Amino acid sequence: MARTAYIHIPFCAHKCDFCDFAAFAGVDDLSQEYTRVVINEIAERVLQQPNDGELTSVHYGGGTPGYIDPEYLLDIHKAVRGAIGLTPDAEVALETTPHAISLEKAKRWKEIGINRLSIGVQSFNDNELKAMGRDHTATQALKGIEIAQEAGFDNIGLDLMYGLPEQTVSTWGQTLSTALSLRLPHLSAYGLTLAGNSPLLVRYPHESESYPSEDIYVSMYEALVSMAPATGLHQYEISNFCQPGFQSRHNLTYWTNDEYLAFGVSAHRYVNGVRSSNFRSLKRYMRDYLGNETFEEIDEKTKAKEAIFLGLRLREGINVAEFRLRYGFDIEQLFQEKIEKLSAGGFLTVENGHLRLSQSGVLVSNLVIAEFV
Ligand SMILES: C[S@@+](CC[C@H](N)C(=O)[O-])C[C@H]1O[C@@H](n2cnc3c(N)ncnc32)[C@H](O)[C@@H]1O
Ligand code: SF4
């Protein structure tokens, strides 16, 4: 049984040069038809595989769900509530760009039942925003946040990015200071990753000196990890920080290796031991919304491995006893040599029954986690 649902809304005002999500600009005329298709998908999937239990979280991601007409969100949300059901205290989160927020829209989001906003700011430096191909300024970002607060949203998370072209440790520090001065309850900060065919590479190829060097990149992450706690944000995952009680319920589902439903183009789900995803092409999805782009049955050993590499992302790490009960493997036995080697190197610790990354392990988390894959 899944307690979480992800719904992908692929529409954006503008396609950013660095973005590899199923996100499309200039096809707004499809949004009404898309809404109808998603509603059909919800109804048919739930009929095929009833989910016995209500959802504790629904996440509207994208794309930019905040960009579309809120009445389409209302229609989809009604379908989720009707076909699956939500607990009274469910987290209902919506991703948006800051300049898609208007007071009228934000008030409507509240009426629909959305109670958490995730706002993609990326940077408070106009030069960097331009370099990465965003279509808004830092001032517009601050304005969007202010409007969301005026509409009554207090559960707001900001997304930032580092490792950007034209970014320095100093400009990143300024972006962080501005973000932290807002005292919002949640912050995500992602290192830039580019797909091989990313349009950003045309203007800034990999070898361009405009990107921060490896050392600077690490210093940027160190600045993040040291500055966020000073303003009351606790690091609960490699890239995520929050005030107590404000973790993203939806994202926690991924890291605790729990199952989740998903609807919409390119949406990825994990249901009854199967990971599958919808077609990534918008046209193909809209023609065949129950078809699979990917489909993988997860066997017991893979489940345990996935739980390790996802669980290690959490700062509290993995509860070794719970892991044994849930997956039937003793992590310390299964990976004895690796754990000894990585602990001796100072990258992992086993303390109070939890296997977790050490502070230096977090800095090279990809390499440490790769040892368990
Ligand atoms: C789907 S976007 C949602 C928000 C909204 N569409 C926006 O861009 O403001 C989710 C977040 O993923 C992050 N992201 C997108 N592309 C990325 C990339 N290539 N590398 C690292 N992070 C990325 C950004 O921080 C972005 O806010
Ligand atoms: S607005 Fe967000 S989802 Fe849309 S293209 Fe830009 S980063 Fe991607």
Image (spheres, grey):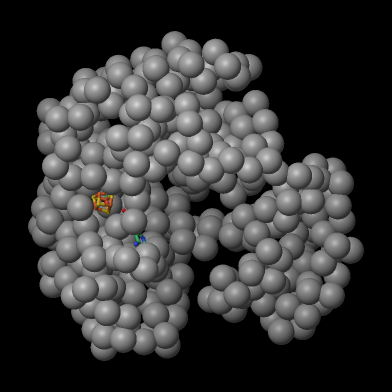
Give the residue at x 36% y 87%: 213
User: Quick one: quadrant of the N terminus?
Assistant: top right
Asked whether, in this view, residue 134 is left or right of residue 45, the answer is left
Give the residue at x 62% y 55%: 310
Asked whether, in this view, residue 83 is left or right of residue 216, the answer is right
Q: Return the x and y of residue 253 as percentages of the image width and height.
A: 57, 41
Q: Which image quadrant is residue 210 in?
A: bottom left
Q: Return the x and y of residue 315 as percentages of the image width and height.
A: 60, 60
Quadrant in which ligand 1 is drawn? bottom left
Res 50 seen here? yes
Query: Which of 342 and 274 lies nearest the eye of the viewer?
Result: 274
Q: How many marks?
A: 0
Q: Which image quadrant is residue 153 in?
A: top left
Give the residue at x 13% y 67%: 130
Picture layout, residue 47 above or below residue 113: above
Q: Return the x and y of residue 79 as percentages of the image width and height.
A: 39, 15
Picture layout, residue 343 above or below residue 275: below
Give the residue at x 56% y 45%: 254
Picture layout, residue 280 above or below residue 108: below
User: Quick one: quadrant of the C terminus?
Assistant: bottom right
Q: Return the x and y of residue 341 as percentages of the image width and height.
A: 78, 80
Q: Which image quadrant is residue 12 in?
A: top left
Res 124 seen here? no
Query: Which of 101 and 301 lies nearest the eye of the viewer?
Result: 301
Asked whether, in this view, residue 285 is left or right of residue 238, the answer is left
Query: Which of 337 and 231 lies nearest the eye of the viewer?
Result: 337
